[in-house]
Amino acid sequence: MDYVVLLKQVPDLAEELEIDADGTGLDREWLSFVASEWDEYALEEALLLRDQGHGGTVTCLALGVETGDVDELLATCLARGADRVIKVGSFEAPPDSHTAAAAFADALAHVHYDLILTGVQAIDDLDGQVGPLLATRLDLPHVSVVTHIALAHHHTTVTVHQEYAGGIVAEFEATLPAVLGVQTSRETPRYAPVSRIRQLMKTATIEAMAGGGGAGSGLVIEAMAIPETGSTAEMISGNPQAIAERIAAILSERGIGTAVAR
Amino acid sequence: MSGDIVVIAEHRDGAILDPTYELLGRARSLAAASGGEAIAVLLGSGVAGLAGSLGAAARVIVVDGPGLASFSPTAYQAALVPLVREREPALVLIANSGSGMDVAAGLSAALDLPLAAYAIDLTIDAGGPLATCQLYAGKIQAKVRFAGGRGIVTAVAGSFPAEAGMGPGSPVIETVAPAATDDRIRFVDLLRPEAGDVDITRESVLVSVGRGIGEQENIELVEALAAALGGAVSSSRPIADLGWLPRTRQGGKSGLKVKPRVYLALGISGAPEHLEGMRGAELIIAVNSDARAPIFSVAHYGVVADLLDVVPALTARVGG
Ligand SMILES: Cc1cc2nc3c(=O)[nH]c(=O)nc-3n(C[C@H](O)[C@H](O)[C@H](O)COP(=O)(O)OP(=O)(O)OC[C@H]3O[C@@H](n4cnc5c(N)ncnc54)[C@H](O)[C@@H]3O)c2cc1C
């Protein structure tokens, strides 16, 4: 069983986002980047499947984007246990999902796979999710919002759960090869020591492949804006006691809590 | 190209789901602007009876076939690609649900039609369709158009009123067989959640906790606050994923939809998938250390502070 995992970095939401001078994109100058959370779940699932008796290799692909640090992303994959890592194409800025899917499709013409896993979504995939876009390009079946991935012992099918509202779940059986958009992993993504990642960044082989004939999203971004938050909320400030006092008063007006002035 | 606005209907257990009505309501006003029809496409097996629930549409296309008895990403895609290609609608509207994400991106790639994902608003003006989409977990909104004037839109649940799509009517009903089938993904079973110890949809006070809680030990702090308020603890998805609280306590897109009298959101960023499940609460009080957290856009009261300071103080105040 050969697994391919597609990963990328996204802006760290713990940092403040700013809009660029054009008003149509993010100001990338001060952004810091982190691995997309759902892609990390995809990698963890691939490693678990490989190590739980199904064997085979885990190959990680990421686009060669200049923003952020794709080498660190791929070295982290190796540190966690991936067998092989490949940087695909070369992009000044993170491309849209359609372009990313086209680039991955180019590279995957040269890589063997039985199961392709990627994050169900990323926080910046305005033009849709890479999983189904790539699958359709490669004429593979795809399932999104997946948990509970289980391979059949004969390795020709996989069963997965797809999550719906209200905690309802559909179980599907998919014929391999297939593409899965992973929602969460059975285990919290494993930790890789920073020292190990740093060392691998110096010593490990990160392969490079061409990809990305500029598919384009077909979208025209007219404007990007930071929505007003808190413009409708009444903000409460003060020390914790003063805040508690005010919240207690708001709740007691509604007859909630045992709040009584003492 | 036509001015038609197509809505892909979602149904389960013999009923049309609310997000479909939300889209259908908006499709009606969009069709009026584009000079086309609001068309609902209903896929299934023996589902013609459900077409009557789609009275707000001008036309219902029932795609009926045994391979469509349950949702399957491949079967839906195979049936929809030729249909959309032939009808050339101006817009295809799809709910951003588990199945909708599969269908929308698959169609986009197969038909080379652009896709605007995570839309919270959609209008048509002189420049054509204009979608407002949420990005970066709700921290950024982008206004986008389609280069060729037509495309696919996935909408976040709750973006449009469902009532507008529920009206009675007598749509033209066309029944067709799927032009193609693809059984590479086969439906096996529908699994329903087991009842939890607490039914958060019935609680009037929810003390809801997100990743801002930091550590599992701190869950005790919110348990104590919930007890003091006579309410229950609920959570965002990551807390359930971590196993810190049972899945049955999760509110949101893949959890439960709650409408308590009071919803205290503690260390929850307010991602679109979370808001989907709780924005209907009567009173929302949010505590978050990030002043720009999207949760403040739906909160009635907001506190920019460390929840580990506020929660014990509040518990002492109301329960002490
Ligand atoms: C298909 C799909 C379905 C999903 N379904 C759901 C769902 O049903 N429910 C759901 O919740 N999510 C769902 N999600 C996940 C969703 O996208 C978000 O990842 C999730 O809601 C984030 O949870 P959070 O707010 O707890 O964590 P984060 O986004 O990490 O936010 C943590 C917040 O805590 C704040 N914080 C940190 N420390 C403190 C402190 N000491 N005091 C106060 N504040 C602090 C931070 O500023 C931040 O805003 C779904 C995602 C997908 C793709």
Image (cartoon, rainbow, N blue to C red):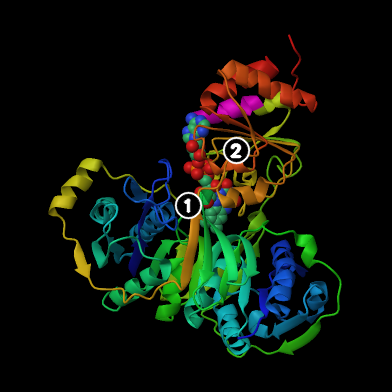
Instruction: Say if the magenta span includes residue A215.
Output: no
Residue at screen point 62% across, 48% down: B275
Residue at screen point 79% across, 85% down: B173
Q: Looking at the picture, how far across and down is residue B281, in whole percent?
A: 72, 42
Stretch of the chain drawn in magenta: B215-225
Q: Secondary structure at mark 1?
A: helix
Vertical comparison of A127 with A185: above or below: below
Q: Secondary structure at mark 2?
A: loop
Q: Is mark 2 within 8 Å of ligand 1?
A: no
Residue found at the far front of this picture: B126
Kindly report the secondary structure that dominates the magenta region of the rendered protein. helix
Q: Kindly identify which residue carries mark 2.
A: A230
Instruction: Say if the magenta span includes residue B222.
Output: yes
Identify the mark at residue A195; answer none if there is no mark. none
Q: For label 1, count other residues whose C-alpha is less than 10 Å away and answer few (under 14), some (14-19) or many (20+).
A: some
Mark pair 2, 1: CA separation: 18 Å
